[in-house]
Image: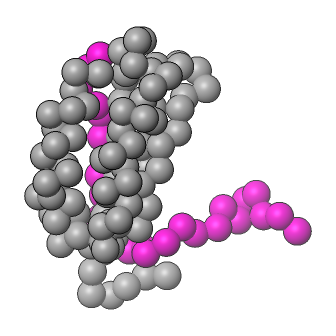
Amino acid sequence: MAREDKKMIFITAKFHIKPESADRWPEIAGPFTRATRAEPGCLWFDWSRSLDDPHEYVLVEAFRDGDAGAAHVGSAHFKQAQQDLPPHLRSTPKIISQAVDQDDWSELGELAVK
């Protein structure tokens, strides 16, 4: 479903976690995750752990539009995460951030379930 006036901000980020923090990462990132999900402009904020590297987590997040994304980055919980999360990281996270003409997931038609 495209919206003509504003574009959704879609972000994917890879986090390489220190081995001693990897199993506890959902707990460590929990306050940030819960606060972000409660933002009115957050569409989703979902973590997944890599099947190939147990120290890597991938974050898939989306915000209603650029204003919602800016509000997220300007929030108190984002600033707190900037203090709380880096001590548990092996390296600076990698990110892809795009504005897209959608406001939800589309179906993957090539794998349609009939």
- Relative to the observer, which residue lies in front, 46 or 97? 46
Nearest to the observer: residue 24 or residue 96: 24
Q: Position of residue 92 (x, y in %)?
A: 23, 26
- Residue occupying the point 49% across, 82% down: 1
Q: Position of residue 107 (x, y in %)?
A: 64, 67
Which quadrant holds the C terminus? Answer: bottom right
* Residue positioned 15% across, 63% down in the render: 70
Asked if residue 29 shows in the view, the reply is yes
Number of callouts in the render? 0
Judge left or right: residue 109 versus residue 5: right
Residue 16: image location, x then y, percent: 37, 23
Return the residue found at the far bottom: 4
Q: Residue furthest top?
A: 19
Query: Residue drawn at (23%, 70%), measured in percent from left and top?
Result: 68
The main secondary structure of the magenta stretch is loop
Residue 69: quadrant of the picture: bottom left
Based on the picture, tell me whether residue 89 belongs to the magenta stretch.
Answer: no
Q: Confirm whether the magenta stretch covers residue 105.
A: yes
User: Quarter-wise, where is residue 10 in the image?
Assistant: bottom left
**Is residue 81 positioned above or below 68 on the image?**
above
**How is colour applied across the structure in the image?**
one colour
Q: Decide if residue 86 is on the left or right side of residue 48.
A: left
Q: Which quarter of the picture shows residue 22?
A: top left
Instruction: Name above or below for residue 77 compared with residue 104.
Output: above
The stretch in magenta equals: 90-114
Using the rendered image of the protein, determine whether residue 96 is visible from the camera's viewpoint.
no
Taking 16 as reference, is 1 above or below it?
below
Q: Residue furthest right?
A: 114
| Residue at 30% in and 72% down | 41
